[in-house]
Image (tube, helix red, strand yellow):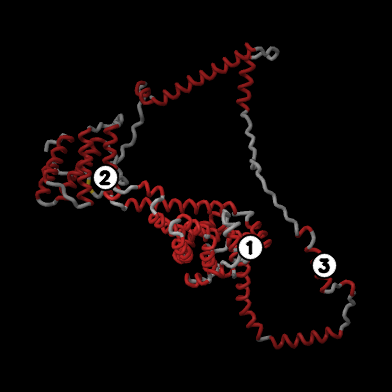
């Protein structure tokens, strides 16, 4: 494989970033990976169903046990995709026996329950390593990312279980209630129904095939991330890019030098001729080494202990926390010294003196509690206290009432003298939006002028109605109270206006008459 053909960015990634990358790749190429896992597994389950029709559990267990054999084709496909050489599903299926030629027996016996299977499989399938070389390679890879690979395996197991339970629940939801009520579920739960068990086996086979691409590709991306970290692929790719840019810059310069190559050749010829006439300096033979001696010297250096030192330490230890010593405040130390100096005699440390010190401390705490309680009560009832003391507040600047809200003119001057009569006239004339809009903006105008509501442009109709209802439930001092009929009327009028303005649903005629009557009652306006 050529790392310059890598289709993803070569950079250092944390284990969880590598798993995220694997999830994205698995989503993109899920269907072919699903097929190359499912078809061989189905070809194994089919003859087992024919040979062991009375033992569906053993057949499914055999397929589950041979998972490492089925995992190799998806791994082969995604490795080719990652290095820019994608292969189709039929082509990958033709490689089934070739990819399972190495260490297949070990993977279904000794290594079958390996929790880092997805992380270790590329060493066998892609690097073609076995024996001591494989063990050394696995030991190097496991120094990091082994924990993430184990969690990946546990996550895959739980996902398969969750999907199986969800599939059963979904199937049950599609059964009509009349049919489900007449089904005897006890034989089904005991496993006495072979047909249902075989259907469950087929369903679980599809679930395993659906989860397998994510498990395999995420483990492979963990492996690639570890190799990038160990072998510095990101650095090598950067150097390759620098070399290519340098080569592109040198090409125009070489074309310019080619024109003067004849002159350079003549000058080089005279320089060599002149150099041959001058005596060469004497060279001592013992100062040079033959290639054999140089190679022997290199081998001795490489065989030294510095190049073959390996140390592996396993064990648990406490994390070294940075201790941050917090100094006791100086004022607290002085306060404690003063407290004990008042209660204890330095020459006589009897029990009575200790009791006096404790009593003194309790007295101080009680005084602190009393002072804190007085401060809280003063803050809680400061409005009433200031009112009793007749302190006058500085009047707040009056906020200017808005002229328009929601595109409606709410000025008092824009309203007719008889609002209800005008509303009914517009309604009978067929101008239903203008009629209800007039009643709604008259309501907003009265709420602002008479009840001192501050409706801003950032509020919606529903938020304005909630403000009216909130003041009805929680009256505020210094502001006119809102009665329950007024709050209820504003809620109903707002709902009718929204239905007309946004849903284009007109209220009935009787509704308009009722709204006008309520408007006159709540605002006490003789129309």
Label 3 Cα crowd, 10 Å radius (few <14 / some 14-19 / many 20+): few
The N terminus, quarter of image? bottom right
SS type, badge 2: helix
Q: Could you say where residue 39 lies in the image, as x and y percent from the top left?
A: 46, 66
Q: Could you say where residue 306 lies in the image, as x and y percent from the top left?
A: 77, 58
SS type, badge 1: loop
Of marks 2 and 1, which one's residue comes earlier in the chain? 1
Left or right placement of residue 28 versus residue 441 in this view? right
Q: Are marks 2 and 3 in contact (CB under 8 Å)?
A: no
> Which residue in the protein does label 3 denote?
297
Of marks 2 and 3, which one's residue comes earlier in the chain? 3
Q: Nearer the viewer, residue 311 or 448?
A: 311
Q: Could you say where residue 349 lies in the image, as x and y percent from the top left?
A: 67, 14
Q: Which mark is residue 232?
A: 1
Q: CA distance from mark 3 to mark 1?
A: 29 Å
| Residue 351 sits in quarter | top right
Left or right placement of residue 409 versus residue 259 in this view? left
Q: CA distance from mark 2 to mark 3?
A: 90 Å
> Which residue in the protein does label 2 denote?
461
Q: Nearer the viewer, residue 279 or 99?
A: 99
Would you say residue 14 is visible in this rendering? no
Q: Could you say where residue 103 lies in the image, as x and y percent from the top left?
A: 61, 63
Would you say residue 168 is visible in this rendering? yes
Q: CA distance from mark 2 to mark 1?
A: 62 Å
Q: Nearer the viewer, mark 2 or mark 1?
A: 1
Residue at 67% across / 48% down in the picture? 314
Q: Are marks 2 and 1 in contact (CB under 8 Å)?
A: no
Q: Nearer the viewer, residue 386 or 234?
A: 234
Q: Nearer the viewer, mark 2 or mark 3?
A: 3
Q: Nearer the viewer, residue 72 or 329?
A: 72
């Amino acid at each position: 494989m050529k790392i310059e053909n890598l289709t993803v960015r070569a950079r250092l990634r944390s284990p969880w970033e590598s798993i995220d990358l694997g999830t994205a790749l698995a989503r993109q190429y899920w269907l072919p990976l699903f097929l190359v896992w499912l078809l061989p597994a189905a070809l194994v389950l089919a003859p087992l169903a024919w040979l062991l029709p009375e033992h569906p559990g053993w057949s499914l267990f055999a397929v589950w046990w041979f998972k490492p054999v089925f995992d190799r084709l998806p791994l082969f496909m995604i490795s080719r995709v990652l290095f820019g050489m994608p292969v189709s599903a039929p082509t990958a299926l033709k490689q089934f026996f070739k990819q399972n030629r190495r260490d297949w027996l070990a993977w279904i016996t000794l290594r079958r329950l390996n929790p880092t299977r997805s992380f270790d499989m590329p060493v066998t399938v892609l690097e073609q390593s076995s024996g001591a070389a494989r063990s050394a390679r696995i030991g190097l890879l496991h120094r990091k990312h082994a924990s993430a690979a184990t969690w990946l395996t546990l996550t895959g197991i739980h996902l398969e279980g969750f999907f199986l339970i969800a599939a059963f629940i979904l199937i049950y939801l599609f059964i009509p209630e009349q049919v489900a009520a007449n089904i005897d579920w006890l034989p089904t739960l005991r496993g006495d129904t072979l047909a249902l068990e075989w259907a469950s086996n087929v369903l679980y086979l599809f679930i395993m095939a659906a989860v397998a691409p994510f498990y395999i590709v995420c483990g492979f991306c963990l492996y690639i991330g570890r190799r990038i970290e160990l072998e510095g692929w990101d650095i090598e790719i950067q150097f390759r890019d620098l070399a290519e840019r340098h080569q592109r810059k040198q090409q125009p310069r070489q074309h310019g030098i080619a024109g003067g190559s004849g002159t350079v050749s003549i000058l080089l010829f005279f320089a060599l001729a002149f150099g041959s006439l001058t005596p060469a300096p004497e060279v001592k033979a013992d100062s040079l080494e033959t290639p054999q001696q140089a190679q022997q010297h290199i081998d001795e250096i490489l065989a030294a202990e510095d190049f073959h030192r390996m140390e592996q330490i396993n064990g648990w230890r406490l994390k070294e926390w940075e201790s941050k010593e917090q100094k006791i405040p100086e004022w607290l130390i002085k306060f404690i010294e003063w407290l004990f100096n008042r209660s204890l005699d330095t020459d006589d440390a009897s029990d009575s003196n200790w009791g006096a010190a404790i009593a003194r401390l309790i007295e101080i705490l009680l005084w602190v509690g009393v002072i804190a309680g007085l401060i809280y009560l003063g803050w809680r009832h400061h409005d009433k206290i200031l009112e009793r003391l007749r302190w006058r507040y500085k009047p707040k600047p009056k906020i200017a009432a808005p002229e328009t809200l929601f595109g409606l003119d709410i000025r008092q001057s824009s309203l007719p003298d008889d609002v209800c009569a005008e509303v009914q006239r517009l309604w009978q004339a067929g101008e239903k939006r203008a009629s209800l809009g007039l009643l709604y903006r008259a309501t907003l105008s009265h709420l602002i002028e008479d009840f001192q509501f501050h409706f801003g442009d950032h509020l919606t109709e529903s938020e304005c109605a909630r403000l009216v209802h909130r003041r009805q439930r929680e009256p505020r001092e210094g502001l006119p109270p809102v009665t329950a009929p007024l709050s209820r009327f504003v809620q109903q009028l707002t709902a009718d206006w929204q239905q007309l303005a946004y849903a284009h649903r007109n209220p009935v005629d009787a509704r308009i008459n009722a709204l006008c009557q309520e408007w006159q009652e709540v605002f006490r306006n003789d129309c």
